[in-house]
Structures are given as C-alpha cells and as structure tokens.
Image (spheres, rainbow, N blue to C red):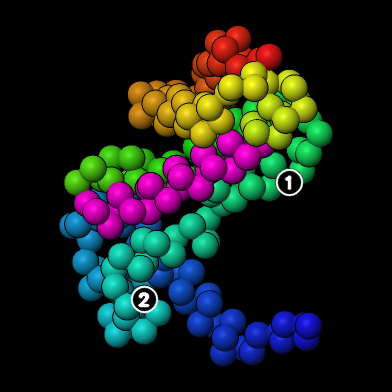
Amino acid sequence: MAEDQPRTARQEQAAATRAHIADVALRLFAERGYSATSTRLIAEEANVSEGAIFHHFPTKHEILRSIPEYRTTFIREAELLVEQSKGANTETFLLALFGRFGELLETERHYVRLLLTESGADPAIDDVFQEMIDRTATTVAGFLDQRVAVGELRADLPAESAARSLLGALLLFLLSDRGGTVQQRRHRLAAYFDNVLDVWLRGALA
C-alpha cells in the first residue's frame, strides 16, 4: 500500500481553519447554547466569512459533529487505554481510565456539559451525545468481556450494562459537582470513584 502523501500547504491551512472554526463554535455553544448560536456569529468570532463556514461545514450540525476530531475525547481515551491495558486486571484498568477521564472533565468540561445539558432538547446534540456514550461503553465492555473470558469477572456479567453504569456514575459527578479549584475537584472525583469502584467490583468479580 502506498504511503499517505504529505499534505500541501493549502491543505494544512484548510485543516487549521476548520479546527479554528470548530474551537470557536464550541466556546459559543457552551456560552450561549447550541440553538442560540448562529453560523453568522461563529463566523464573526472566528474572523472568517459565513461562506467560509459553509465551505468547511455544510451545516451547523456538522460543526458540532466535527468537534471530537479536534478534542481529546472519552472515546479516544477509552480505545487507547484498552489497547495499552491488554492483560491488566479490571481494577487497574478502571482506575487508569477514570483517572484520565477526570483530567478530561477539566479540559473538555464545556463540551461535555454542552452535550449533557442540551441533548434532551436538541436532536442534533443528542445524536452526538449518544454516539459518545455508545462507543465509549462498547469499548469498555470489550475490555470487561476479556476479563470475563479469563475468569476474573463473573461469567454472567452483562458487560455493556456494567460499562454504562460506570459511565453514568462519571456523568452524574460532572452534573452535580460544583465549586472549588481544579485540584479540589479532582480530589473529590478520585474519592467518589474509589467508592463507586468498590461497590461495582463487589458485584462484578467472580
């Protein structure tokens, strides 16, 4: 198979413009709400023409859907950790996964809150939110199935539901936790997840 050709300067510029538009749009979506943010406003804030917006993104929905391409997401982190954690036990994997997720709750806080707070009211946002949950849960469930196969976890463990229960606990923390410094929030998340994991493992271990 031929190696990928390096991108031209024009292609690099187009990719940079696309990423810049997505980044500005995310900030505006988080500040004003998805529905209240027009492509005209995005263009003004990004210092590009509205025509340039539509050149890179046919619709506002496509801007939203593109944001994970330019952000470190739960999906990407889960897939990477599964690949790196072959042979690790469940507790080690989940502690690493949720430690990284805790960092993402800070760096991607606006994005995740946008998906959580507006997904129920806007089908476009709900599509993106469901994809994030479905793909992340499926990835984590795949790891759990591996641990079932080696006898560490219960043979009858419903891996997909078990994975979703852990993600649900994480998202509940994000919605309910308020105030304090970054370090204080991370400390609260670590303590919270230690308790969640303790209860979860009691029901999951063989």
In the rendered structure, the answer to whether residue 34 lies left or right of residue 177 reads left
Q: Nearer the viewer, residue 25 or 60?
A: 60
Picture residue at 29% right of the left edge, 85% below the top: 51
Q: Is residue 112 visible?
A: yes
> What kind of element bears circle 2?
loop
**Numbered range of the magenta stretch:** 122-143
Residue located beneath label 2 in the image: 57
Q: Is residue 64 above or below residue 107?
A: below
Task: List x then y, in percent, for residue 163.
Answer: 53, 31
Predominant secondary structure, magenta span: helix
Residue located beneath label 1 in the image: 83
Picture residue at 59% right of the left edge, 37% below the top: 140
> What kind of element bears circle 1?
helix
Dot 2 or dot 1, earlier in sequence? 2
Q: Is residue 194 above or below residue 102?
A: above
In the rendered structure, the answer to whether residue 153 lies left or right of residue 68 reads right
